[in-house]
Amino acid sequence: MAKRFDLEDVNIYYGDFHAVQDVNLAVPPRSVTAFIGPSGCGKSTVLRTLNRMHEAIEGAYVTGKVLLDGEDIYGKNVDPVAVRRTIGMVFQRPNPFPTMSIRENVVAGLRLQGVRSKKTLDEVCEKSLRGANLWEEVKDRLDKPGGGLSGGQQQRLCIARAIAIEPAVLLMDEPCSALDPISTLAVEDLIAELKTDYTIVIVTHNMQQAARVSDQTAFFSLEATGKPGQLVEVNSTEKIFSNPEKKETEDYVSGRFG
């Protein structure tokens, strides 16, 4: 079941450094929200707070509330490991386990959860690879290493691995930046299909990609180096790219800034 996020007065720190300030943002279920903005504005930092990856960095912490269907994922009794099972993540560079087989890459998360049934693992493997539009390309070599696939196939393998544990949300941190145009198109098509089942948040430096794949766009910026990043504007993607409310947004999307 896809879930929605609500960020309320979220401030993000690396030790003494205030990285991002006062983010208030709603992410609807079964939709794609894109984070855009210049380098260093905090968009990837905000993304990592959505599944508690940020606090894995020593000294890093978050204030405010990050609500997933009304429950604060930073609540006192909330297990961060359980949060990361509910909220999957795909990184900038494909990171399959290179010596593991394609099959074992896909079901690695299930094995960690204690699933041992070969029938169940095989069924989930096929379903996830089909969900990632990869099954037809790899069905005859499931026992070959995942590291032997092309870059675009490896990224779709990582998406298959993420959806195998049936998360409610998928986070994607510049998932196409290391891919060629044809592989990028395959991943973008996949994102459009996945949003029927998942809430997706994507960070992208490519504004054309944000315009193509997202329903809602959030523009982040920073006043000056060393100052905290901030959410300048969030709106429907169509409005952000055609008639933004803030001049700073207009300057960025029109290429006059950043």
Image: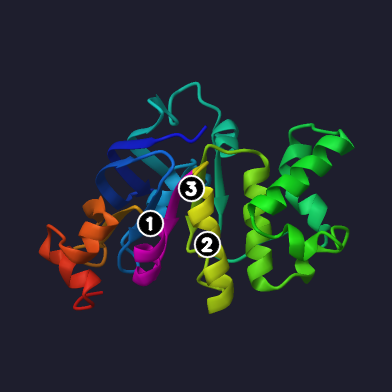
x 48%, y 43%: residue? 55
In magenta stretch: residue 240: no
In magenta stretch: residue 209: yes
Q: Which residues are magenta?
A: 199-214
Q: Looking at the picture, how far across and down is residue 29, in whole percent?
A: 41, 38
Mark 3–mark 2 distance (CA, rounded to whole Å): 10 Å
Give the crowd class for mark 3: few <14, some 14-19, many >=20 residues within 10 Å. some
Q: Looking at the picture, how far across and down is residue 126, in whole percent?
A: 76, 48
Location of mark 2 (residue): 189
Which SS class for mark 2? helix
| Along the viewing direction, whichever of 199 and 88 lies nearer the viewer | 199
Snapshot colouring: rainbow
Location of mark 1 (residue): 214
Amino acid carrying mark 2 in the image: Asp
Mark 1–mark 2 distance (CA, rounded to whole Å): 12 Å
Location of mark 3 (residue): 195
Mark 3 and mark 1 in contact (Cβ < 8 Å)? no
